[in-house]
Image (spheres, rainbow, N blue to C red):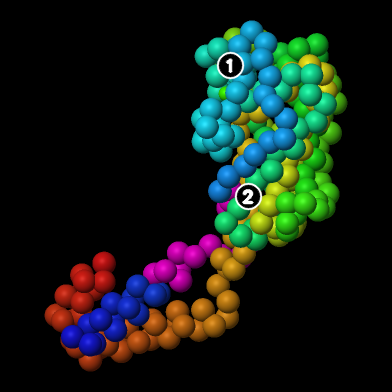
Amino acid sequence: MIRKSALAAALTGAVLALSAPGAGHAATVNPVSYSFDQPTGCGTWCYTDTGGVELTDGVLGYAGWAVNEGLPWVGWRNTAQVNIDFTFTGPQTFSSVSIGSTQDNPADVVLPNISIFSSTDLINWTFQGALNTPVSSTNNNDAYSLAPHTFLTVSNLNFTSPYVRVQLNSNCCFMFADEVRFDGSASGAVPEPSAWAMMILGFFGAGALIRRQGPGRARRVETLAV
Ligand SMILES: [Ca+2]
Ligand SMILES: [Ca+2]
């Protein structure tokens, strides 16, 4: 019985080690919560954030901001700057941040400029990168378009932090966001040399047990491990 549990543990450890993200693989990093420092605005409808989850719930609006009465959007009106501060489970390493937004015309709903900051205490913020979005009518979408909207991405980031500020700077009257996505890797997700050593030992240990117990017993144990 001891051997069986040891084999199960060895196999489980090997599988877990193999499924851990490897070095250089970008992954989505999900925040725990966020808050913004400026109240949402109203126009034809009000563009609130129901429950403070809309920017991370995976629900997207259409390129046409007025579809579904603008409900999927979080919007600010005549607000020069909004800081959206995201909290993560701990320090994470970030490579890019993408913000879903849209525009109908340069005198109404307009794509914002974006700056990214990091912090370790939610008080002091360090600039990490920005995306300037020149105002252009080529970004216009019909307000009732059912096409997907684009994401504005601040890329080439490389910082590790438990907090990220996404700062939206208005280019006109309304600015809308429906989702914010973070790419990077969780710190410590890359297996350390000792983890690799344990994984290899686990494989050798499993192999030795299988050989000692014979194919019939090993098959039973493998079933238990799965
Ligand atoms: Ca959303
Ligand atoms: Ca909304």
The local secondary structure at tag 1 comes to helix
On residue 15, the disc is: none
The residue depicted at 65 percent of the width and 45 percent of the height is 86
- Residue on which disc 1 sits: 70
Q: Is residue 175 left or right of residue 63?
A: right
Position of the N terminus, as image quadrant, is bottom left
Q: Residue furthest left?
A: 216
Ligand 2 found in image quarter: top right
What segment carries the magenta color? 15-31
- Per the image, label 2 sits on a secondary structure element best described as strand
Q: Can residue 102 be spotted in the picture?
A: no
Left or right of residue 191, residue 152 in this image:
right
Q: Residues within 10 Å of mark 2 (few under 14, many from 20)?
A: some
> Are the residues flagged by discs 2 and 1 in contact, CB closer than 8 Å?
no
- In which quadrant is the C terminus drawn? bottom left
Judging by the rendered image, the residue that carries numbered circle 2 is 87
* Image x and y of residue 210, in percent: 25, 84
Say which residue appears at 21% left-offset and 71% top-offset: 224
- What distance separates the C-alpha of mark 2 from that of mark 1? 26 Å
- Identity of the residue drawn at 55% across and 19% down: 71
Q: How many numbered callouts? A: 2
Q: Which amino acid lies under the numbered mark 2 shown in the image of this protein?
A: Thr
For disc 1, the neighbor class at 10 Å (few under 14, some 14 to 19, many from 20) is: many
Which quadrant of the view contains residue 184?
bottom right
